[in-house]
Image: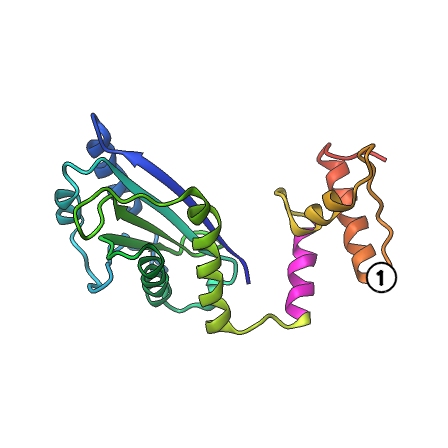
């Protein structure tokens, strides 16, 4: 069960704090809940967190971390708060420090996702430094572990349905990654496969890539 996490480090010097205020307003804008209401900030302990107080605590911080957490199966969660809270607990364990963070859940896209803002200070008031590898890989693996525990492993039918959906998508897919791994030095790939289902996937995907101008026979 895959999770995508987009991470960004934002410097707060100069106009950074003003930009941070604008970003906080943006993620709490109208229409992001299931009922079309404004987004509600929450934290580790509070279901209604104070964004102004969070920014006030961050005045003087060198930077702020922003994460967008999107589980591929997030539609199966009635509420994303417990998932995000458990993820941030795991992150605190890995980093060896308490974190000051707030989050907002968005349900206005095909994949419900969460915006998480983290102050750039650790609990000893020193600058928070997170290794790039942890932000790109470690945090994502932690999130995927939680989703697997919550929802269980995927059935073969679920896996096949997900792969069928990828045939027409305009993004890099698992089918593309397989084709890339198996391509010849001349950039040639084959639709043939020992498994009939895999051959159908590859052939359908290559036709889609051809229509997009990304492959030719």
Q: Is residue 52 magenta?
A: no
Residue segment shown in magenta: 157-167
- Picture residue at 36% right of the left edge, 62% below the top: 90
- Picture residue at 19% right of the left edge, 60% below the top: 48
Taking the image as shown, residue 179 lies to the left or right of residue 145, namely right
Q: Nearer the viewer, residue 133 or 31?
A: 133
Taking the image as shown, residue 40 lies to the left or right of residue 159, namely left
Q: Is residue 162 magenta?
A: yes
Q: Nearer the viewer, residue 141 or 5?
A: 141
Q: Nearer the viewer, residue 203 or 33?
A: 203
- For this orientation, the residue located farthest to the top is 14
- Specify the principal SS of the magenta part: helix
- For the rendered model, the colour scheme is rainbow
Q: Residues within 10 Å of mark 1 (few under 14, many from 20)?
A: few
One can see residue 31 in this view: no
Taking the image as shown, residue 125 lies to the left or right of residue 8, namely left
Q: Position of residue 20 (x, y in %)?
A: 24, 37
User: In which quadrant of the rendered image does the N terminus lie?
Assistant: bottom right
Q: Secondary structure at mark 1?
A: helix
How many numbered circles does the render carry? Answer: 1
User: In which quadrant of the rendered image does the C terminus lie?
Assistant: top right
Q: Position of residue 178 (x, y in %)?
A: 72, 49
Residue at image mark 1: 196
Q: Position of residue 162 (x, y in %)?
A: 64, 60
- Picture residue at 82% right of the left edge, 39% below the top: 184
One can see residue 136 in this view: yes
Q: Position of residue 11 (x, y in %)?
A: 27, 32
- Picture residue at 51% right of the left edge, 63% below the top: 73
The quadrant in which residue 8 appears is top left
Taking the image as shown, residue 143 lies to the left or right of residue 54, namely right
């Amino acid at each position: 069960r895959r999770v995508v996490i987009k991470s960004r480090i934002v410097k707060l010097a100069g106009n950074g704090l003003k930009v941070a205020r604008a970003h906080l307003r943006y993620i709490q804008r109208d229409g992001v809940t299931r009922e079309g209401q404004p987004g509600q900030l929450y934290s580790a302990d509070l279901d209604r967190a104070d964004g102004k107080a969070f920014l006030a605590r961050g005045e003087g911080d060198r930077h702020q971390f922003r994460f967008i957490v999107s589980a591929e199966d997030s539609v199966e969660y009635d509420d994303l708060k417990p998932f995000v809270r458990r993820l941030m607990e795991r992150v605190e364990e890995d980093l060896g420090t308490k974190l000051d963070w707030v989050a907002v859940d968005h349900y206005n896209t095909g994949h419900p996702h969460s915006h998480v803002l983290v102050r750039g200070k650790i609990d000893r008031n020193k600058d928070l430094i997170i290794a790039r590898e942890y932000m790109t890989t470690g945090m994502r693996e932690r999130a995927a572990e939680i989703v697997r525990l919550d929802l269980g492993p995927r059935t073969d039918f679920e896996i096949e349905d997900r792969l069928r959906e990828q045939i027409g998508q305009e993004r890099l897919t698992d089918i593309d990654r397989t084709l890339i791994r198996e391509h010849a030095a001349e950039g040639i790939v084959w639709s043939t496969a020992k498994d009939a289902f895999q051959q159908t996937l590859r052939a359908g995907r290559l036709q889609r890539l051809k229509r997009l101008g990304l492959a030719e026979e």
